[in-house]
Amino acid sequence: MRIIDRSENKLSPYVSLVTRKIVIDSSAAPSFYHSLKPRDYVCILPLTSDGNIIMVRQYRPILERTTLELPAGLLDDGLDPIVGARRELIEETGWDSDQPLSPLGKLDPDTGRLENRLWCYLASCNEKLADWQPETGVEPVIMSPVELQKSVNCGEFNHALHLAVLMLAVSLKVFNIY
């Protein structure tokens, strides 16, 4: 297999369309493969000192409904992911970590279609910032592990990438949903 041409068409500040012309077999005609290249993003699993999880509810126009998610966001070009993660945590929830964020891992969201990465972090949070102003349309929600498990089981919390962050935390034994 050999890539004989590659082009990138910027569709917006957030995503590009990448086209690759690939020869799989020298006797066959070239094939075209397309992928989307969104900016990398970060996702944070914030835990309070009493073991609860800080989540967010927000309306998602793409889905045309309100979702329950972990704090997360797009990463600005050139920004260190851990800096972006802390900023998203504060902006969306009003909580900050009293310790350095702990990396849980770096994931490929969709190896067949997307060219970005998901940077995953754990945050230990003890109190909400006094001067925090809520982000319009984003509501912080504190859930116990049991409430989180129920929201997963009933499909309320169903963001696949955020469920992957939970799985990383469970697999690394830094969080237990049961």
Image (cartoon, rainbow, N blue to C red):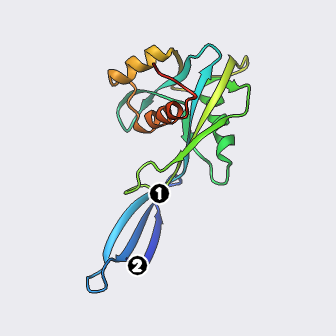
Judged by depth in the image, the label closer to the viewer, 1 or 2, is 2
Q: Residue furthest left?
A: 28
How dense is the environment of label 1, judged by Cα within 10 Å: few (below 14), some, or many (20 and up)? some
70 versus 62 height, above or below: above
Tell me the quarter of the image containing the N terminus.
bottom left
Q: Is residue 56 left or right of residue 134?
A: left
Residue drawn at x 73%, y 25% is 98
Residue at image x 52%, y 50%?
117
For this orientation, the residue located farthest to the bottom is 27
Q: Is residue 68 left or right of residue 27?
A: right
Q: Which residue is mark 2?
A: 2
- Identify the residue shown where x is 66% and y is 25%: 124
Where residue 76 appears, as percent x and y from the top left, is: 62, 49
The answer to whether 138 appears left or right of 4 in the picture is: right
Q: Please identify the quarter of the rendering in which residue 154 is found.
A: top left
Q: Which mark is residue 99?
A: none
What distance separates the C-alpha of mark 1 from that of mark 2? 18 Å
Sequence order check, earlier mark of 1 and 2:
2
Q: Position of residue 158 (x, y in %)?
A: 38, 30
Regarding mark 1 in the picture, which secondary structure is present there?
Answer: loop
Nearest the eye: 15 or 166: 166
The foreground one among 129 and 175 is 175
Q: In this figure, which residue is indicated by the disc labeled 1?
A: 115
Residue 171's spot in the image, x, y percent? 50, 34
Mark 2: which amino acid?
A: Arg
Hey, which quadrant is residue 59 in on the image? top left
Relative to 49, is 165 above or below?
below
Type of amino acid under label 1: Glu
Residue 129 at x, y = what percent?
71, 20
Report the residue at 51% width, 23% height from top.
176
